Image (cartoon, rainbow, N blue to C red):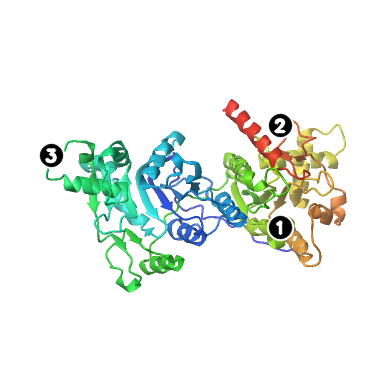
C-alpha cells in the first residue's frame, strides 16, 4: 500500500459563467487535412487550452463551440491511417468528416451550408470564425471586438450579425474570416449573384461584388452586408517572427509547419479561450471518469465486420452515458506492446490521479441501461457487503446498508466484472483512487516484461490475492446469453467476431431511446 494525494481538483472559488444553452458567441471551424494530427493537437492547445483528453469537454459550456472539418478522403487499404483517424475522432469528439455530407464537396459554400444545418441540432451562434489549419486567431481579441455588452448603441448591435471581417484584397489572405450569422444567410440566399470566377472563396466573391457595385444603386439583400477589410489585423506570415507587427493581431495565416504555430503564438503571447469548463460533481458526490480504448485492431480479414467500423458508435454509447450522469468520458490509446490488457492498465493509471473512481468499459461492451449510475451501482454494493456481514434476518436493510457502506469504503478498492467463458476479458473494471489501487496497477505492470498477458489475465492475477477469494459477488456484466432487460452492460468479449453483435445491440438501443424520448 502507498500514500497518494487526493484527486486533482479545480479551485472551487474560481468564478466561471457556465453556458447551459446551445447558443454560442462564436462558432469556430478549422479546415484541416487528415494527416495533420500534430497541427490539430497544437491548435487545440494554443486556441482552447486542451493539452490532452484526461479532463475532457463533457459539454461545450462556455461562449465558444469549435470543430475541425476534414475533407473527403479515400482511405483505400491504408488501415493505419484509418485507425489513427477513428482514434482521434473518438478521443476528442471534435472532428467532422465531410465524407458523406452534402455531396462530399469541400468548398466554402458547402461549409456554410453545413453550418446552417446545425440549427437542426439546436446549435446557434452569433458569429462564425472560419480558418484553415495553417492559421491561428486571437479569440480573446475577437470576442472583445464583437462584444456588445458595454454599449447601448442599438444601431451598432443591430449591424453586428451582418458584419464580415477579414482581409480580402491580398491573395491567399482570405483563409481566415469572421462572419455574422445573418450574413451567412444573406450570402447563401444570393449565391447566384456571386459568380466571379477570379476568386475561389464565396465570401471573397461577395466582398468584391459589393465593392464593384458600391457606386451603383444595386438593390438586393447583399447591400445589407457590412465588410471590414482589415489588412493590419489579418496578416499572411512571411516566415520571420520579427516581422510580425506589434498592433493587435486578429489572425495570422501561412503557418505551414506545426512548429510555426508554437513560435508565433509564443511570440505574440496569444491567450487561449476555453471551449468548456470542467464541472465539479455535486457536494458529496464522487468525481468519476468512464474510460475506454481508442485503439482498435482491424479484423476485416477474419470477420465480416471489423471493430474499427463500429468503434465510433461504441464510444458514442459510453459518451452519452457519461454526459447523462456528469462523468468525464476518456478514450485512450491502449495498444502497449500490441496487448490490450497492458494498455488498459496504463490508461487507468494515467486517469486515476484526476478522479475518485475510474470505470473502465471495453469496446466489446455496450451500456444498455443509461439510468444506472456509478453511484447507484455503489449503493447496491454497499447493501450486498452489509448482507454478507450481517446474516441476521431480524436486522433491517438500512442497518445492513450502513454497515456495508462503512466496510466497503474502508476495505474495497476494485470492482471487477467476472469473465464469461474461456479467454474472455472482464469488460468492466471499477477502481478507486487509493494507495492500494496504485500499488495494484504497479504490480500488474511489473510482470509486463516477464510474460505475455492474454485476455482474462487481470482476473487470473487477482485470484492470487487471499481477499479476492472471499469476494462479494454481484452481476455487473452480462454475456449475451445472460442479459435481460434493465441490465447495465452486455459484453460480447467471448465472441470471436463481436462487431456485428455490437452494431445490432447499439442499433436496438438507439431505437429504444428514440421511442422513450
Q: Which residue is drawn at 37% across and 69% down?
A: 267
Q: Residue 374 carries which label?
A: none
Choose between 291 and 303: the one closer to the eye: 303
Check the picture and name the quadrant holding the N terminus.
bottom right
Upstream in sequence: badge 2 or badge 3? 3
Q: Where is residue 261 in the image (x, y as percent from the top left)?
A: 42, 65
Q: Which residue is drawn at 82% across and 57% down?
A: 461
Q: In the structure shown, which secondary structural element does the residue marked by tag 2 occupy?
A: loop
The answer to whether 373 appears left or right of 123 in the picture is right
Does residue 154 show up? Answer: no
Q: How far apart are marks 2 and 3 (CA)?
A: 68 Å
Upstream in sequence: badge 1 or badge 3? 3
> In front: mark 2 or mark 3?
3
What residue did someone put label 3 on? 217
Q: Residue 345 carries which label?
A: 1
Q: Residue at x 78, y 52 (%)?
A: 411
The answer to whether 59 appears left or right of 371 in the picture is left
What residue did someone put label 2 on? 486
Amino acid at each position: 500500500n502507498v500514500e497518494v494525494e487526493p484527486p486533482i481538483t479545480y479551485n472551487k472559488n474560481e468564478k466561471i459563467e457556465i453556458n447551459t444553452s446551445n447558443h454560442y458567441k462564436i462558432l469556430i471551424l478549422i479546415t484541416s487535412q487528415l494527416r495533420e494530427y500534430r497541427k490539430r493537437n497544437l491548435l487545440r492547445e494554443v486556441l482552447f487550452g486542451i493539452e490532452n483528453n484526461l479532463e475532457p469537454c463533457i459539454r461545450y459550456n462556455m461562449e465558444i463551440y469549435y470543430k475541425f472539418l476534414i475533407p473527403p478522403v479515400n482511405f483505400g487499404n491504408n488501415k493505419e491511417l484509418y485507425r489513427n483517424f477513428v482514434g482521434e475522432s473518438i478521443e476528442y469528439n471534435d472532428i467532422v468528416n465531410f465524407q458523406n455530407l452534402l455531396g462530399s464537396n469541400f468548398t466554402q459554400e458547402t461549409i456554410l451550408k453545413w453550418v446552417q444545418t446545425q440549427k437542426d441540432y439546436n446549435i446557434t451562434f452569433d458569429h462564425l470564425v472560419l480558418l484553415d489549419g495553417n492559421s491561428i486567431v486571437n479569440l480573446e481579441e475577437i470576442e472583445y471586438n464583437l462584444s456588445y455588452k458595454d454599449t447601448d448603441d442599438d444601431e451598432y448591435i443591430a449591424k453586428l450579425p451582418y458584419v464580415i471581417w477579414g482581409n480580402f484584397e491580398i491573395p491567399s489572405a482570405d483563409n481566415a474570416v469572421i462572419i455574422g450569422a445573418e450574413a451567412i444567410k444573406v450570402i447563401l440566399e444570393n449565391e447566384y449573384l456571386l459568380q466571379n470566377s477570379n476568386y475561389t472563396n464565396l465570401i471573397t466573391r461577395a466582398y468584391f461584388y459589393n465593392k464593384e457595385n458600391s457606386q451603383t444603386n444595386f438593390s438586393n439583400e447583399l447591400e445589407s452586408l457590412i465588410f471590414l477589410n482589415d489588412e493590419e489585423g489579418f496578416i499572411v506570415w512571411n516566415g520571420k517572427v520579427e516581422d510580425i507587427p506589434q498592433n493587435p493581431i486578429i489572425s495570422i495565416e501561412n503557418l505551414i509547419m506545426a512548429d510555426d504555430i508554437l513560435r508565433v503564438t509564443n511570440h505574440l503571447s496569444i491567450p487561449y479561450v476555453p471551449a468548456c469548463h470542467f464541472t465539479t460533481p455535486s457536494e458529496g458526490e464522487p468525481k468519476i471518469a468512464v474510460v475506454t480504448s481508442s485503439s482498435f485492431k482491424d479484423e476485416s480479414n477474419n470477420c465480416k465486420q471489423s471493430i474499427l467500423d463500429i468503434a465510433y458508435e461504441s464510444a458514442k454509447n459510453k459518451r452519452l452515458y457519461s454526459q447523462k450522469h456528469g462523468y468525464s468520458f476518456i478514450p485512450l490509446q491502449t495498444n502497449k506492446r500490441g496487448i490490450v490488457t497492458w494498455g488498459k492498465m496504463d490508461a487507468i493509471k494515467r486517469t486515476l490521479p484526476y478522479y475518485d473512481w475510474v470505470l473502465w468499459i471495453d469496446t466489446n461492451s455496450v451500456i444498455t441501461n443509461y439510468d444506472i449510475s456509478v453511484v447507484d451501482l455503489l449503493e447496491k454494493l454497499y447493501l450486498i457487503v452489509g448482507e454478507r456481514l450481517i446474516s441476521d434476518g431480524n436486522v433491517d436493510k438500512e442497518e445492513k446498508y450502513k454497515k456495508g457502506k462503512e466496510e466497503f469504503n474502508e476495505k474495497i478498492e476494485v470492482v471487477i466484472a467476472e469473465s464469461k467463458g474461456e479467454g474472455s476479458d472482464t469488460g468492466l473494471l471499477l477502481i478507486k483512487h487509493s494507495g492500494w489501487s496504485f500499488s495494484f496497477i504497479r504490480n500488474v505492470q511489473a510482470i509486463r516484461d516477464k510474460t505475455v498477458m492474454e485476455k482474462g489475465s487481470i482476473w487470473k492475477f487477482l485470484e492470487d490475492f487471499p481477499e479476492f477469494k472471499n469476494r462479494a459477488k454481484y452481476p455487473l456484466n452480462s454475456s449475451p446469453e445472460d442479459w435481460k432487460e434493465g441490465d447495465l452492460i452486455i459484453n460480447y468479449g467471448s465472441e470471436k467476431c463481436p462487431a456485428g453483435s455490437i452494431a445490432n445491440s447499439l442499433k436496438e438501443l438507439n431505437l429504444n431511446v428514440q421511442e422513450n424520448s
